[in-house]
Structure formats: C-alpha cells, structure tokens
Amino acid sequence: MIDTLTTDRSPAEIPPDTVDHTDNPHHATRWLILGVIALAQLIVVLDATIVNIALPTAQESLGFSNDSRQWIVTGYALAFGSLLLIGGRLSDLVGRRPMFIAGLIGFAAASAVGGAAQNFEMLVGARVAQGVFGALLAPAALSLLTVTFTDAAERARAFAIFGAISGGGGAIGLILGGALTEYLSWRWCLYVNVPLAVLAVVGAVLLLKKQPRPEDAKGIDVPGSLVVVAGLVSFVYGLASAESDGWSSATTLVCIGLGLALLAVFAVVESRVADPLLPLHIVWDRTRGGSFLVVAIVGIGLFAVFLFLTYYVSLTLGYSPLKTGFSFVPMILGIMVTATGSAGLVAKIGPRIPVLVGMLVAAVGMVLFAQLDLESTYAAHILPGLVITGLGVGLSMAPAFSAATSGVDAEHAGVASASVNTFQQIGGSIGTAVLSAFAATATSDYLVGKAPSEANQALAAMHGYTTVFWWSAGIFAVGALLCGALLRSGPVFLDPDAAPVLGH
C-alpha cells in the first residue's frame, strides 16, 4: 500500500505538541464534545445487540415467523452498511454539525416508531429507517472527533474512549436489553434510544459551532454512489441469505458474486471521476488500510462472542436475559482498561505493536472459549475468556480507529470516517453469515449416525459453539499477522496542514 498517511514533511518536522489551536472553535469544549460524540456512538453500536435480546418476545407479541425474524436485524444492516459512504460524503459537503443532529433526530424518530410497531412490516420499516439515519450519524460523529482533537496525545486519549465505546457498546446493549425486556417490555429496547438521542441533540446544539458551507465544496459522485449502494446491498443480502438458505443456494451465490463485481466496478469508477465518493488514496494508504482491516476482523470476532456465547449462557446454562447481559460486564471492563490505559503508549509508539498484541490476546480468549463444555461454570471457565478477550479487543480497537482517520484532510474526514464504520459493519455481516454457517454445519455433522436424543442435541449445539470459537481464534491470529505487517512502526504524527479544523 502507498505510504501517504502524512504530507512530505518528516515526523521530526511535525512534533505532536506544536499544533496551533487558534483556528479550532471547539478546542475549549473538546472534552464535553467528546462526551456528546461518545453518547451518539453508543446509541448506534448498542442497537446492534439490544434488539437481539428483544427478538424472541417481539416475535411472540407481533406473531411473525422464524424466517421473518432475521429481517429485523438484516433490514438495519442493509440500510446502515450500504449508505455509510454517502452519509460520510454528505457530512463533508453539508456539514458535520447538521448531519450529526439530523442523524440523531431521525434515529430517535425511527426508534419511537419501532417501539410502537403493531405488526412485522412496521417494525422492519422502522429498523430500515434506523439504518438510514445511523448511516448519517456514525460518520459525522467520528469525523467530528477527528477534526476536534488535533494534539497527538489528546487525540489518542479521545480515540481510546471512542474505541472503548465502539468495542463495549454491544455488551452494554445486551445488559440494557436484558433489563428492559425482563422488567418493562421489548418495546423499550427501541424506546430507550429516544431520551439518549434527545440528550445528545441538546449537547450538540449547545457545544458544536455553526460553520459556513465550504466555498469549494463539490457535489455528490452519483455514479459511484449508485454502484457502491447496489454492491453493498447485494453483498450483505447475499451473506444474510447464506445464513438461512445455505452457501450453495442460487440467491446466495448470485448476490455475493454480483455484490463483489459491483464493488470492483466502484473502484474503477472512483479512479476515473473528478470528485470521487471515496478517494482511493484513503483506502490504499498502508496505515489506514491496515486499520480498516483491524476494525473488520474485530467486528467478526466480537460477533462470535456476543452471539454464540449468548446462546451458550442462555440456552445451555439457562441464564435469564438480564443475567445474560450482566455476564458480559467483565469484557466491557477489559475493553475500557486497555482502550483508555494504552492511549499514552499509542501516542508514543504508534498503533502497530498494540494492535498486534491486542489481536493475539483476543485470539487467546477465543481459545479459552473453545474449551467450554456442558459442565463448564461461569467463574472458572467463562470469566477468564471474557476478561482476556476484552483486554485484547480494547488494545487493538482504539488505535485502529485513531490511525484510520489520521492524516486525512478535512474535506474527506467524513468519508474516511464512514469507511471505518463500513468495514466494521461488513465485518459484522461476514461474521454473521460465515460463523453461523460453520456452527450449523458442525452441529449437523455431529449428529450424523447418532440418535436425536436431547443429550445428543445439547452436545451437537456445544460442538457448533466451540467450532465457531476455534475459527474466531484463527481469524484473530491471522489478522494479527496481516495487520502487523501492514501497519507502520512508530507514532502517527498529525500534520496541522493535513487536517485543519473546519468544524462545519
């Protein structure tokens, strides 16, 4: 990959503590702004798991089938994943502040409609709308963070907090979803977004400064936008179909093949248009490209923990929804410890070593989960894996988020931020399809030649879970080697001319 993370000036000429903050209208309130951005990010990431906890009771309440149930999750993923790049570009063109506020308001409104849903169609429509507004909100939030913190050490701390929220938000969603489902109603798993979004909107209105639209702002790359949306929708739809129809079905093969072909066409289009939706230098940069890969791999691994470990503790160990959610607290704490505690280290030595070590540590956590059986206990067998996985994820996630948006000029901060979220979403979608297929195959293979007794069914399910954890350990280990080779050694210095704070 091309090494274009910074400008032609050498690191010695760009010390991290000499950034001029006079043009930064948000410098004085930057830590309060971080709180607002972190809250917005929490709304987006917890929604990926909080609804999963509510699905069984929502299905019972509205009376839809098991085949229809997956679209509650897939509808959100299709809209969110396919529109992120356009949302990021709109953030650069229209302004980060208005897109951030519009995304929050729209997400809250869609959540309210979903909570009040009277039928399956209304719930799916609300989830799709959540995905649309989430695609506006997520890149605006990350790009606001990118241009608000320009000092290297402070930026590392800010992204450490953001990375902790991104990594632990799914587990927080499990806890919150379990509590709301058990003591109130599944509908509150959607309603809860409304007060959180209102609080974030108030903070944004008070703290984010209005800025004029850039005079040199370009338009939207229409050909690129159409191709990338079609490509991502087709690819994610194909992955979702693989989970339900199998990898050999015509729908799965055609959609995945068409999606990959359209994404290849998108790359060609972006190399030729005057104002591309995604300038290719953002992706091909060695450090940013490696960071995108880290985010995608962590997305796959976290899916394995959240979904299959949830299955294990709830179905095998018989935990209630609330107890299931709270069982993930150690992992949240582990993520927070390393994500925030390593900020100073990342600022000094850069992302390469923390990411490499973090992903290897996460692989060890997955190996521990692969040792689980029907007689395992939480304290002796689950807790160590949760802590170790959390420490590894936190150590790799925070520096990846920071490096993925470093050195990008303000004109493209939004689309670079959207790229991070896109890779995270695609990683989760791949994890959903691939790991679910591995689990299903392992479970069915185990039952071949055996009586379909209750004991054998339980052992087969257990075999499916441990197979997924072994695959996840391998994915983290291979990812550590790949990302360690791609990421550059040494700190990522910020060029004050490369990313001026426009704050619009």
Image: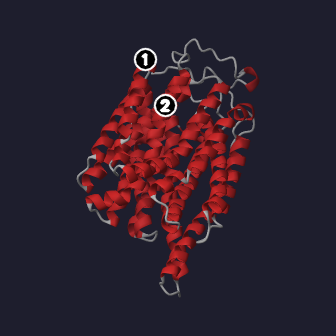
Determine the residue positioned at 54% across, 60% down. 309
With 417 as the anchor, is 210 left or right in this view?
A: left
Q: Nearer the viewer, residue 12 or 261?
A: 12
Q: Is residue 502 above or below residue 171?
A: above
Q: Quadrant of the N terminus?
A: top right
Identify the element where label 1 is drawn.
loop
Q: Earlier in the sequence, mark 2 or mark 1?
A: 2
Instruction: Residue 27: give x, y in percent of width and height.
Output: 56, 17
Q: Is residue 341 above or below residue 390?
A: above
Q: Is residue 107 above or below residue 239?
A: above
Determine the residue positioned at 69% across, 17% down. 18
Q: Nearer the viewer, mark 2 or mark 1?
A: 2
Identify residue type, mark 2: Ile
Q: Quadrant of the C terminus?
A: top left
Is residue 436 at all visible to an observer of this figure?
Answer: yes
Instruction: Residue 464: give x, y in percent of width and height.
Output: 55, 70
Q: Nearer the viewer, residue 466 or 142?
A: 466
* Neighbourhood count class around disc 1 (C-alpha, 10 Å): few under 14, some 14–19, many 20 upward: some
With 60 as the anchor, is 217 left or right in this view?
A: right
Image quadrant where residue 395 sits: top right
Task: Using the image, tell me which numbered label, if any, was put on residue 37.
Answer: 2
Identify the element where label 2 is drawn.
helix
* Neighbourhood count class around disc 2 (C-alpha, 10 Å): few under 14, some 14–19, many 20 upward: many
Determine the residue positioned at 28% across, 62% down. 64
Instruction: Residue 26: give x, y in percent of width and height.
Output: 52, 18
Label 2 – label 1 distance at C-alpha: 18 Å
Q: Nearer the viewer, residue 172 or 86?
A: 172
Residue placed under numbered mark 1 in the picture: 211
